Structures are given as C-alpha cells and as structure tokens.
Amino acid sequence: MPYYIGDVIQEQSKLIARTPEKFREGGIEVQLQAHVSGINPAKGIVELQDNRQIPYDILVMATGTSAIVPDMPGLDLSGVFSLRNLEDAIHIKTWLKEKRAKHVVIIGGGFIGLEMSEALSASGITTTIIHKDPLPANRWDTALSSMMLEELHAHGVEFIANAAALAIEKGKNALLCVRTDKGDYEGDLVLLAIGVRPDARLAHSLGLKIGPSGAIAVNFSQQTSLENVYAAGDCCESFHRISRRWVNIPLGDIANKQGRVAGRNIGGQPLTFDGIVGAQSFRLFNLECAATGLSEKEALAVGYTPASNITWGSAMAPALGLRKIGLKLIADQSSGKLLGAQAVGVAGAVGRINALSVALWAGMDLDQIGYLDLAYAPPFSPAWDIIHNAAQALGRSL
C-alpha cells in the first residue's frame, strides 16, 4: 500500500489479486459491502446487517486486523488516517492529491511508518515521524536501528524520538497539527501507524477460543475450537517453531499459506501448516532491513539463555568495493542452536535472512551454519560470507 500511495505503483488494479468477476468464474460468489451482524452456530447461519441470512455447513473466519488507534483528541478531524487495506490507501492518496500535500506527520516508527516515509519522499512529500522509542523499528538491535535512523536523516525525514502524541488539532501553516510532549508538528495529513491487532470480535461472539495473543486459536489444520469453523490470516495464531508458542504475526505470506491449508482441509485434501520462524523484511530508501526468529528478550521469555553478536562486513568481495551490511545472530548458550537473526545493509540483507530462516526451520546450530555451502561469487559475497563469519565468531564465544 505505501508504494501505491507514493505513486511507485500507479494503478490500483495491480494491487487487486482477484476481482469479484474472476471469483465468480470459479464458482465463488462474492458479497461486497455485506456487514456480518451475527452468527448462529446452532443453526449454521450467518446473519447480515440488512437482515439477510446465509446458511453454512463450514465457516471460515478471515476477519484480518484492525488498526490500533490512540486515545487522544482530534482523531475525527478530516485528514487523519490509518492504513490497513486498499480502501484506506485510496482515501489517503486521494487526499494527498486533492490537498496538494507538502508534508505528512506520521505517528509511529514501525514498518508502515518507515515504508510510508520512503514512499511519500518518492512523490516529493516530506515527513515527520513521531515515535515513542529512541530509535525506529525497535525489534532490531540498536546498532542496526541506528543505521535506519541515519538513512532517514540522509533523505530529509525528521524523526522525533521518545515522544508521545497528545492531540491532533487544526494547524496554522498546514491543515493539521500534532501536539506532543516534545513540541508541535504540522502537516497536511496525519497518519496513525502505531500498529494493528487481530480482529476477533466475531470470533468472540461465536464463542471460539481466543489465544494468549488475542487472536483466534487454531490447530495445524487451521481448525478453531468449533469443528466446522476454520480461521486463516491475520485474525488467527500461528505456531512459532523457535519459541514453541502460538503467536500472531500479521503478514501477507503467512495469511496466504493458512488460507490454502484451510481450503485443502475443507476440500478433503488434508494438509497442515507447520508454523513459522518469524521472517520479515522491509526496504528503507537504500537499505534492506530483515529479521527472523527471536530477539534476546523473546528468547529469555520462553526459557532460553541467549547469547548474541553483531558482525559487520560487505555484501560483496572487498576487492569490488564495500557494500556495508550488519548481521546480528542470537543463539542458545547451552546448545549452540540458532534462535534468531537480524540484518541491515545496502544489499544482501534479505537474502541472508532468508538463508538463516531455513537454518532456523531445520534446527541448525552455529557449527553447522559456520560451514554452510552458500553460493559464492565476488559480486555477491566474499569467499567467507558474513553468515559464516558471524556464526563462527558467536560459536567461539559460547
């Protein structure tokens, strides 16, 4: 969505995976603008707000997420948006063009806030990010998040750290003004990018079990606590193979896999969704930012004794130049098993995190990772890749 708002993607049709007409060609009837007011599990009926009733034998919950909205005055002012879906993106893009926006204030320095600052910059719109923590993307180590902050500054993004937004008001020199405990910041649009939570309201009303994460509890076949009700996507939990806990990580690739697993099981072709390792990534101007597995804090919370290191290197052979990359590994002190990894760099960060995600999935330890057979050529890595160097260095310290 950020790339559509910033005109990197100019046609909204490219963001629609399948139209209602295309669904109907496959025998799937799509009801748009149909608000579900209730579900009667005893009768197997979905009740719509317009009093229609749709019977079901099997029900799939795919209600996604809802945006986290702070409790403060001014949220109802025109020009205050959150970004959760394509409809939100269309409204934001329309507002920016109609108001000829020059500056946007973003509340929140996570994935969406950072991606939006880049996308808006591509359209010539400057941004101010107001964030509650000292550095952006607080899942990453401070040394790696500091690289992100430098990249923001290099591209003219104002980052207000350790700040709390208190209210949104009409502005004097722009349409809106965000009042914070660190000063006032004006913009032609205010974007709430604090995060999302699973939308489990209908699941609650149906009496489904809700997991510790606040999302719908499912088994490995995507079945809920009711036998004929399945759930898939951002509204439900996934099994984290490293923490051995059920978690909620709202990402599109996870949702797609869960939907396919649910469909296969409903259609009589059994398949399980065997979990995740928490891989995720985003681009920030010239940086690739990626992470997988657990952070030290998360590892401690589930009973591991983590050790970690950060290795700095180049994404290509030094003789061809320097393409800086930082790689952090987290491992269990007693077993040497890899628990997590984080990377930021001008190139190669996502590819290395993908490789380490496979290592996590396979349960590999540092000794094995330190001698992995990785594709080598000078334009892509030194002979000893940063993965090798990081794993061997952390292994020696255990």
Image (tube, helix red, strand yellow):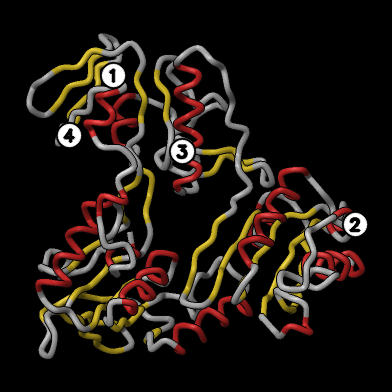
Disc 2 marks which amino acid? Asp
Q: Residue 382, how many percent across, how many down?
A: 80, 73
Secondary element at image label 1 = loop
Please tell me which of labels 1 and 3 falls first in the chain. Answer: 1
Residue 130, horizontal then vertical, whole percent: 35, 78
Q: Report the side of 12 relative to 219 (left or right).
A: left
Callout 3, which amino acid? Asn
Label 4: which secondary element: loop
Q: Nearest the camera: 320 or 233?
A: 320
Where residue 289 is drawn, which disc sits there?
A: none
Q: Which residue has dot 2 on it?
A: 367
Which of disc 2 and disc 1 is earlier in sequence? 1
Query: x%, y% of residue 292?
Result: 63, 56
Tag 1–tag 4 contact (CB < 8 Å): no
Closer mark to the observer between disc 1 and disc 2: 1
* Picture disc at residue 256: 3
Residue 70, how many percent across, how many down?
A: 28, 63
Say which of marks 1 and 4 sits in front: 1
